[in-house]
Amino acid sequence: MPALSDLKSENLVTRAVEALRQFILDELLVPGAELPSQGKLAERLGVSRTVIREAMRILESQGLLEITQGKLPRVLPPNTQVVIDGLSTLMERSSATLLDVLEVRRPVEIEVAVLAAERATGEHLRQMSEANEALAKAQTIEAQILADMRFHKIVAEATGNPVFAIVLDVLAQFLFESRRKTLKQSGAKVALRHHRQLLKAIEERDLTKARQAAADGMRQTEADLKREAKQSAKRKRSPRRR
């Protein structure tokens, strides 16, 4: 790590954060690995311990480090919750709706389905089937949502591209309420039918059918969300009975 002592004081913490993040990447530190002490890091970067301490607090808030008093900082496993929290805040402060998010999700889900049909292993197929069985047996809406999310997560993992899994994990967590609304509209049986169609296409390595199955599922989701939005607007317009 290069020394930062020649930087202006107001930039030191920001640059220290960047330097520490790069250090974790360059050293290929795995989750659970310990960083050097604050004193050693301060010496290597040519800054004070106060700067290092503040930089570590920022990295902790970003979900990269675990800081425990009396112990060396530890690298944490990748955590999409930080992204989810930030995205949720941005969505709440914007005019974006669940239908807007669906427009982003649609092309991703379709491409994921095609790649899964091309690359899925036998283990992926087994896990998809298990997720569908869990959805069929689920007795509560929460259990249905979790089984539905599990199925889509496995399909994303079947692409072999970790970025798809990360992106859909973020969207899936963010769309938890969306799934609640769509499952209430159409029920788990409709979702299960779409899942089975997609699984069959993936098993047959049929890229065209996989694309169609994913597109059909997204159209169903869009229809359910629009129906829920109309019903919600109608409820708001209806006068409350005393």
Image: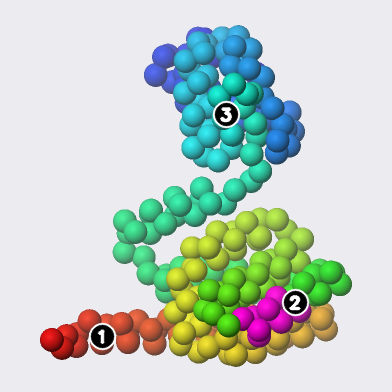
Q: What's the amino acid at mark 1?
A: Arg
Q: In x, y percent, where is residue 117?
A: 77, 75
Q: Secondary structure at mark 1?
A: helix
**Residue 28 higher or lower than 190, as above or below:** above
Structural crowding at the residue carrying mark 3, measured as other residues with C-alpha within 10 Å and reported as few (<14), some (14–19) or many (≥20): few
**Residue 115 higher or lower than 237, as above or below:** above
Residue at mark 2 to residue at mark 3: CA–CA distance: 39 Å
Q: In x, y percent, where is residue 149?
A: 61, 70
From the image, give the main secondary structure of the stretch colored magenta: helix
Q: Nearer the viewer, residue 142 or 113?
A: 142
Side of 72 where 85 appears, left or right: left
Which labelled disc corresponds to residue 235?
A: 1
Label 3 belongs to which residue? 68
- Residue 231 shows up from this direction: yes
Q: Please check the rendered image and state whether residue 135 is part of the magenta-colored stretch, yes or no.
A: yes
Q: What's the amino acid at mark 2?
A: Glu
Please tell me which residue is depicted at 65% across the width and 69% down the height of the picture.
150
Q: Quadrant of residue 69?
A: top right
Label whose residue precedes the other's in the sequence (2 or 3): 3
Q: In x, y percent, where is residue 156?
A: 69, 66
Task: Name the quadrant of the N terminus.
Answer: top right
The type of colouring in the image is: rainbow
